[in-house]
Image (cartoon, rainbow, N blue to C red):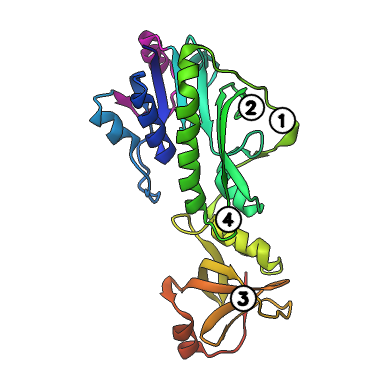
């Protein structure tokens, strides 16, 4: 039986840990994160799953410290598996497992290496993404690929929708290759890093909308940051507005960015094209088009950034 130490968090961590257990991998330790009270916790708990199966867990702020390294070294693991763990593992830790360290990344590597790959793929208008299991090195997401599984991104999918698909893709990729990996017969393919790029993390303020952009670009940003993420932000009449859901529209635009209500539906005139605003909040309160029109009228209201 192969022994593993698992670094995991989030839904991908939860589902992939289940895959290891289904294949009778001896998971000697789970390294995970404490939930951040400032973060919306909408995903499954890796720690609770580990506890359910009697697996010891630790939650170090930094796993690259001598005491954690010593604890893991004493377990003599064959493998590491990292499933949406948020800290980079440095060379001393990576040198411990006898048969290698593997990471599950939420994109089709070498595309979208780095942080929040699902959100970036939507922002950039991709129609496909997926999950990739690859060997870990000190550089993020650049090791040899062991397995991949693709999923479609549909035109109105939000980041939450796509993340659910990527979670299933990760489970499928791991489940498919794990027997060969444990048997030592899995093949690994070197990445051509020229075919992709590295992307950094995103902050809430990155969701501020630039209405001079096209309706498609704005729609992609709205769905990439839709709840449970912070949402796309703008201002109308000097009041903060959060755009939660949009759809493409055949309305004719003027090219002068503005919010308006027509025939009981809300719209946004963009730099080019028009979006239907399906869900929105004004000053933190969700309104529908009729409620907005009853209070403010059906004129055109310019956006303030």
Nearest to N terminus: mark 2 or mark 4: 2
Horizontal placement of 61 versus 223: left or right? left
Q: Name the spot of residue 126 as percent of width and height, x first.
A: 65, 50
What residue is rendered at 58% in x and 74% in y?
Answer: 276
Camera-near label (4 vs 3) is 4
Q: Is residue 134 above or below residue 26?
A: below
Is there CB contact under 8 Å for labels 1 and 2? yes
What residue is rendered at 50% in x and 42% in y?
Answer: 166
What residue is rendered at 46% in x and 88% in y?
Answer: 295
Marks 4 and 3 sit apart, C-alpha to C-alpha, by: 22 Å
Which residue position is annotated with label 3?
268
Nearest to N terminus: mark 1 or mark 3: 1
Label ID, residue 142: 2
Camera-near label (2 vs 4) is 4
Q: Is residue 30 above or below residue 165?
A: above
Which residue position is annotated with label 4?
154
Label ID, residue 193: 1
* Magenta segment: 56-77
Is residue 193 or residue 36 the one in the foreground? 193
């Amino acid at each position: 039986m192969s022994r593993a130490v698992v670094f995991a968090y989030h839904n991908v961590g939860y589902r992939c840990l289940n895959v290891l257990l289904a294949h009778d991998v001896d998971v000697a330790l789970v390294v995970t994160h404490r939930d951040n009270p400032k973060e919306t916790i909408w995903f499954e708990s890796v720690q609770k799953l580990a506890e359910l199966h009697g697996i010891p867990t630790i939650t170090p702020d930094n796993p690259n410290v001598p005491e954690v390294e010593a604890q893991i070294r004493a377990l003599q693991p064959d493998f590491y598996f990292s499933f949406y763990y948020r800290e980079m593992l440095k060379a001393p830790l990576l040198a411990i497992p006898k048969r290698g360290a593997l990471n599950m990344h939420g994109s089709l590597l070498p595309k979208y290496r780095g942080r929040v790959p699902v959100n970036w793929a939507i922002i950039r208008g991709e129609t496909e993404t997926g999950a990739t299991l690859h060997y870990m090195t000190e550089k993020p997401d650049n090791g040899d690929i062991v397995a991949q599984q693709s999923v479609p991104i549909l035109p109105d999918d939000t980041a939450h929708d796509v993340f659910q698909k990527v979670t299933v893709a990760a489970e499928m990729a791991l489940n498919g290759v794990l027997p060969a990996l444990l048997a030592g017969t899995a093949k690994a393919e070197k990445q051509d890093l020229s075919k992709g790029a590295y992307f950094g993390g995103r902050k809430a303020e990155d969701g501020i909308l630039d209405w001079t952009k096209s309706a498609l670009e704005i729609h992609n940003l709205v769905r990439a940051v839709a709840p449970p993420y912070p949402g796309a932000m703008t201002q109308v009449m000097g009041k903060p507005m959060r755009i939660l859901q949009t759809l493409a529209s055949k309305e004719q635009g003027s090219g002068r960015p503005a919010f308006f209500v027509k025939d009981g539906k809300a719209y946004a005139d963009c730099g080019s094209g028009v979006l239907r605003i399906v869900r929105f909040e004004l000053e933190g309160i969700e309104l529908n088009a009729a409620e907005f029109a009853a209070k403010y009228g059906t004129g055109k209201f310019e956006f303030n950034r």
